[in-house]
Every structure is written in structure tokens, then in C-alpha cells.
Amino acid sequence: MKVSELTALLEAENMTPGVEEDREVSCGYTCDLLSWVMAHGCEGMAWVTVQTHMNVVAVAALAEMACVILPENIDMPESILEKAADEGLRVLKSPLSAYTICGRMMAKGVPEKAE
């Protein structure tokens, strides 16, 4: 699934216009503990989190994730969105809960990260 397709599936808003939207999503993940995500994140991952600070961008960029998804219309500060765009990281904001986001991704065949 492409990030553009995921955006539609999750009724999401693209918070980083100009960042590539046709990146392939390899798997999905939900976690708010950054050290855990650093240990388990991977290239192409769609990461669902309620965290909105600069370290989210750093972790996602380091792992070369496809996107970060903010549930429940959580806003990310503009300065952090600018950094995400500079790093080529797509940030999505969805009105859906994290639970529903993961359920939709799983139902459409987005796999859980294989260990």
C-alpha cells in the first residue's frame, strides 16, 4: 500500500505537503515509547503515535519510516512539521482513534512488523 492510499483509508490530512506520497508502506506499528520504537522501527513503517515533539521526527527519519500518523486529530507544532518535511517524512493527521487506524490498516493487509 502506498502512503497516498493509506491517507485516504484513514480519512487523514497530509500535514507535510510536498513530501513524497507514493512511498510504499511495509508495515504498521503503534507505540508512544520512543526508545521502544527506536529498537523496533524499520524502513517503510507507518507509525501511529500521540507524540508530537521533535524526537518523533528524529526516530522516524533514522528508521526511514514511510510516515507518522497522529490519531484523533492531534496537531503537531508547525516548526516540527517543517523539520519533518525537511527530512522527507510524511505526517498524517486522522480523526480516527489509534485503535481504528490499526484495525483499518490490518484489514487492508498492512502487516505487523516481522521480527
Image (cartoon, helix red, strand yellow):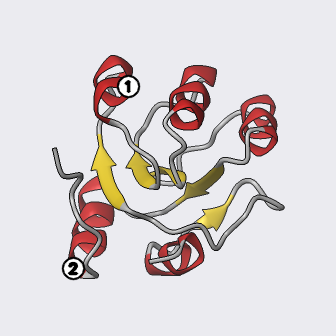
Q: Amino acid at mark 1?
A: Met
Count of all numbered marks drawn on residues in the image: 2
User: On the rendered structure, is 56 left or right of 39?
Assistant: right
Q: Amino acid at mark 2?
A: Ala
| Closer mark to the observer between disc 2 and disc 1 | 1
Q: Is residue 77 above or below residue 108?
A: above
Helix, strand or loop under label 2: helix
- Can I make out residue 33 in this image? yes
Name the disc covering residue 38, or none.
1
Helix, strand or loop under label 1: helix
Residue 86: x and y, percent? 81, 39
The residue to which callout 2 is attached is 107
Specify few, some or many for label 2: CA neighbours under 10 Å numbering under 14, 14-19, or 20 or more: few
- Residue 37, located in which quarter of the rendered image? top left
Residue 103: x and y, percent? 22, 68
Q: Is residue 96 above or below residue 10?
A: above
Q: Verify CB contact (< 8 Å) between mark 2 and mark 1.
A: no
Task: Please state which of residues 40 and 55 is positioned toward the viewer in this rendering.
Answer: 40
